[in-house]
């Protein structure tokens, strides 16, 4: 079936370093990918998205990379801050328009 | 401009009971999607409503049903509650028959005992 998964359930990063969160997807029909951040007690918050006709997109301190050949998505956070501590989900969407989420990676910032 | 609001924030129900969760979409949004998020898991798509009609459904039994009203607010109803229905229920709104620009509410935490 269609699924989105993540390589690591927990990632610990030193404050100020760059974080890289990885994600694998299995549905080759997916044409839209999104990264969400979810803090405790809150709903998912949109971070950045990318369409399948692109391989890189940059935002403020974040970059999403898409490798369609190996069905891999990554989120890079530059100069990680304590406020970046959260669970990060990659999600994909196909022509049915529903968004499918992965299980999430918890980002832990070390002082 | 207000965001997506959900009510109640927390709820405890007994197995076998019925529950109704409510969602007010963000101003200007006419599409509402509902998700179930079990502890430690990613949100799972339940269904989506666009202009008061169901526009896609995930792998959930018929006892999960919904409504969308003319003002684009929405309800999620769950009948014959089971212990496994305990989860965070999230509502997301967007514009058009699209998943772009999804805005999520903070969710309703449902506990079934």
Image (tube, rainbow, N blue to C red):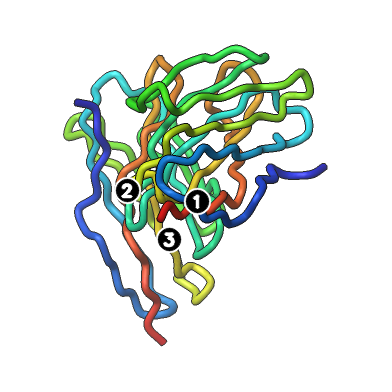
* Percent of width and height locating residue B11: 56, 54
Residue B5 vs B65, above or below: the answer is below
Q: Which is in the foreground here, disc 1 or disc 2?
A: 1
Tell me the distance, in whole angstroms, between the alpha carbons under discs 2 and 3.
10 Å
Residue A88 vs B23, above or below: the answer is below
Please tell me which residue is depicted at 67% across the width and 14% down the height of the picture: B51
Are the two marked residues, 1 and 3, in contact with CB atoms closer than 8 angstroms? no
Does residue A42 appear to the left or right of A87 in the view shown?
right
**Camera-side residue: B61 or A60?**
B61
Q: Is residue A109 visible?
A: yes
Determine if marks 1 and 3 fall on one subunit: no
Tell me the distance, in whole angstroms, between the alpha carbons under discs 1 and 2.
39 Å
**Camera-side residue: B12 or B4?**
B12
Q: Chain of mark 1?
A: B
Q: Which is in the foreground here, disc 1 or disc 3?
A: 1
Assign a secondary structure to mark 3. Answer: strand
Does residue B79 appear to the left or right of B10 in the view shown?
left
The residue that disc 3 covers is A77
The residue that disc 1 covers is B13
Residue B53 vs B65, above or below: the answer is above
Residue A97 vs B4, above or below: the answer is above
Q: Chain of mark 2?
A: A
**Camera-side residue: B22 or A49?**
B22
* Percent of width and height locating residue B47: 47, 25
- Disc 3 crowd, CA 10 A, few/some/many (<14, 14-19, 20+): many
Tell me the distance, in whole angstroms, between the alpha carbons under discs 1 and 3.
40 Å
Please tell me which residue is depicted at 45% across the width and 20% down the height of the picture: A97
The residue that disc 2 covers is A74
């Amino acid at each position: 079936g269609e699924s989105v998964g993540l390589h690591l359930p927990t990632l610990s990063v030193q404050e100020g370093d760059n974080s890289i969160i990885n994600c694998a997807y299995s549905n080759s029909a997916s044409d839209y990918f999104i990264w969400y951040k979810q803090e405790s007690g809150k709903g998912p918050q949109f971070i950045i998205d990318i369409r399948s006709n692109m391989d890189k997109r940059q935002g403020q301190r974040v970059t999403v990379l898409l490798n369609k050949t190996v069905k891999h998505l990554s989120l890079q956070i530059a100069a990680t801050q304590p406020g970046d501590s959260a669970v990060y989900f990659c999600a994909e969407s196909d022509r049915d328009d529903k968004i499918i989420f992965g299980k999430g990676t918890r980002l832990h910032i070390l002082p | 401009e207000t965001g997506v609001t959900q009510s109640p924030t927390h709820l405890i129900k007994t197995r076998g009971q019925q529950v109704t969760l409510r969602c007010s979409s963000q101003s200007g949004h006419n599409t509402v999607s509902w998700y179930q998020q079990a502890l430690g898991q990613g949100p799972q798509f339940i269904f989506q409503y666009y202009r008061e009609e169901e526009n896609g459904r995930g792998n959930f039994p018929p006892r999960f049903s919904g409504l969308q009203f003319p003002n684009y607010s929405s309800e999620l109803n769950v009948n014959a509650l089971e212990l496994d229905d305990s989860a965070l229920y999230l509502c997301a709104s967007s514009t058009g028959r699209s998943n772009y620009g999804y805005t999520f509410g903070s969710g309703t935490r449902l506990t079934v005992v």
